[in-house]
Image (cartoon, rainbow, N blue to C red):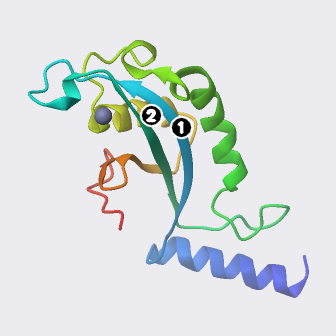
Amino acid sequence: MNSNEEKNKISQVRRDESNSESWTIGKEFRFEASHQLPNHDGKCARLHGHSWRCTIYVSGNRLIYSGAKQGMIMDYDDIKKYVKPIMDNYLDHYHLNDTTGLANPTSEAIAQWIYEKLETEIPGLIAVRVDETCTSQCVYSKGKGNVLIL
Ligand SMILES: [Zn+2]
């Protein structure tokens, strides 16, 4: 271990003890899909589609100490590895009422559904944001306090 590595290790231990800092990263994905809200009293009751945007937020209070992912809490590419099968098999160019099993797939329900698909795969997962339109979005989180994503 060279002296720089030792300094990094000491710094990491201090961060763990104080628990005073954290990093949150977000990885955005886009998909095209239709949905229908059968109970809605407006136009959302009709079958329609969106260009959806989904952002996965991962948080950590320590950086990876060495190796190819040094200085990261998680590699963006690793987030993509977990999300891609969900996009390919359930979300992109599908009818969300059918593929998610949600009878009423609101942004809220879809964000929760995506979160629950990923929570066992990504330990640092703190929130999933779903943008239904460019002015309408929902952030879902659970178990770690309310999360405000700006
Ligand atoms: Zn809609």
Q: Which residue is the site of mark 2?
A: 114
Residue 73: x %, y % from top left: 63, 62
Q: Amino acid at mark 2?
A: Ile
Residue 123: x %, y % from top left: 53, 45
Q: Quadrant of ligand 1?
A: top left
The correct choice, above or below, for 112 with respect to 45 in the image is: below
Task: Label 2, secondary structure: give it.
Answer: helix
Task: In this rendered view, identify the residue nearer to me: 33 or 101.
Answer: 33
Task: In this rendered view, identify the residue nearer to me: 132 or 23.
Answer: 132
Q: Which sits earlier in the primary sequence, circle 2 or circle 1? A: 1
Give the residue at x 53% y 22%.
Answer: 90
Residue most extreme to the right = 2
Q: Is residue 75 left or right of residue 93?
A: right
Position of the C terminus by quadrant: bottom left
Q: Is mark 1 within 8 Å of ligand 1?
A: no
Q: Which residue is the site of mark 1?
A: 31
Residue 140: x %, y % from top left: 32, 45
Number of numbered markers:
2
How far separated are the C-alphas under marks 2 and 1?
A: 13 Å
Give residue 73's mark.
none
Task: In this rendered view, identify the residue nearer to me: 147 or 7.
Answer: 147
Say which quarter of the image contains residue 64. Answer: bottom right
Give the residue at x 23% y 23%.
Answer: 37
Give the residue at x 31% y 50%.
Answer: 137
Q: Amino acid at mark 1?
A: Phe
